[in-house]
Image: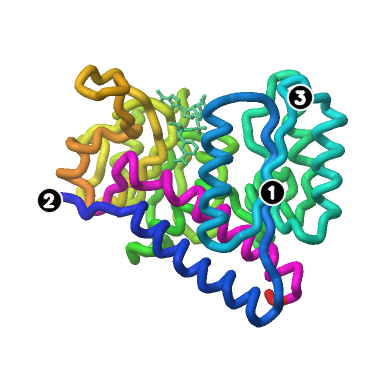
Amino acid sequence: MTANIIDGKAIAQTIQEELTAEVAELKAKHDIVPGLATVLVGDNTASQTYVRMKRKRCAEVGIHSVGHELPADATQEEVEALVSKLNADPAIHGILVQLPLPGHLDEEAVLNAVSLKKDVDGFHPVNIGRLAMKGRDPLFAPCTPAGVIELIDRIGVEIEGKEAVVLGRSNIVGLPVSMLLLARNATITVCHSRTRDLAGVCRRADILIAAVGRAEMVKADWVKPGATVIDVGINRVDDDTRKRGYRLVGDVDYADVQEVAGWITPVPGGVGPMTIAMLLQNTVVSAKREAGLL
Ligand code: NDP
């Protein structure tokens, strides 16, 4: 069997087109322009690139974005004061604090300071708490996990009643994606560095989500034939044949696993593009909710 490839880039593009139409309609019918504020502290180049990409996508769909940059030595009070100001700004419907913050800052306190209603990244502890509770939907789900679910939905794979195995239990991916799958009535198993017989546990999965940050760890004999395999991992491996000296691979050995899986995401071009698409979607949802349209 050769797996169907899940084209995250194309799916994210479709979502972006849908959002562009929705944003145009919001403007035409209700004179509302969704607004996203980004907060970048320090000069981490990867973070700068992520923020730039997010703002570029905002511009493409018609979301108004405002970038705020603070120096690496900004104090806790300065960061929280900026967040408070944005909480009170009616033109801003979403606040994105780019993580990681410099080590001297209390990340949890900063995330706590973001208004629940503007928490488009879905990392506010109350939103995460609601995600974990039965019958209590969060206002926003974290973007990468939400992107994983959206991919599964868009290829038409049923989640309810399936055995889902999640490799990884981080706050930003593994844990929230597990909670989202549980909320959709999958039977979930969450694996981590202390799990015994990882291969055997993974082989039970109808839906396997890999989010460990270990290059090509998941092999074909870890995968049940026909399973849906979603690879969240992004890892650099040395590659002298590339100009930049490395290439990006996922947590799944793609060439090996695609012979067994039913569906598989490539890296890059799978989950990656979905993260920003979900951020844009959350921002539009926030603007509509604020206007009483949801
Ligand atoms: P973390 O390092 O925060 O978490 C990794 C998880 O994997 C932990 O729960 C850890 O277990 C577990 N783990 C690590 N090694 C093993 C192992 N050998 N066997 C079993 N479990 C293991 O990573 P993140 O969740 O932040 O990210 C995971 C991957 O996803 C990374 O490659 C990252 O780059 C990528 N990523 C991609 C995004 C996208 O947009 N596509 C967004 C965010 C992340 P334990 O808890 O016991 O330590």
Q: CA distance from mark 3 to mark 1?
A: 22 Å
Are circles 2 and 3 on residues that touch, CB within 8 Å?
Answer: no
* Residue 6: quarter of image: bottom left
**Count of marks placed on residues:** 3
Q: Amino acid at mark 3?
A: Leu
> How far from the left and from the top, in percent, is residue 69?
71, 34
Q: Is residue 249 above or below residue 272?
A: above
Q: Which residues are magenta?
A: 263-292
Main SS of the magenta part reads helix
Callout 2 environment at 10 Å: few (<14), some (14 to 19), or many (20+)? few
Callout 1 environment at 10 Å: few (<14), some (14 to 19), or many (20+)? some
CB at disc 2 and ligand 1 closer than 8 Å: no
For residue 239, side relative to residue 136 (left or right): left
* Residue 22: quarter of image: bottom right
Q: Amino acid at mark 2?
A: Met
Q: Amino acid at mark 1?
A: Val
Q: CA distance from mark 1 to mark 2?
A: 48 Å
Report which residue position mark 2 lands on.
Answer: 1
What residue appears at the point 54 percent right and 26 percent down from the top-left corner? 45
> How far from the left and from the top, in percent, is residue 64?
65, 58
Q: CA distance from mark 2 to mark 3?
A: 50 Å
Q: How is the image coloured?
A: rainbow
Front position among marks 3 and 1? 1
Front position among marks 2 and 3? 3
> How far from the left and from the top, in percent, is residue 235?
38, 28
What residue appears at the point 77 percent right and 45 percent down from the top-left corner? 114
Give whichever of discs 1 and 2 has the lower sequence position: 2
What residue appears at the point 20 percent right and 48 percent down from the top-left corner? 225
Front position among marks 1 and 2? 1
Q: Which mark is residue 105?
A: 3
Give whichever of discs 3 and 1 has the lower sequence position: 1
Report which residue position mark 1 lands on.
Answer: 66
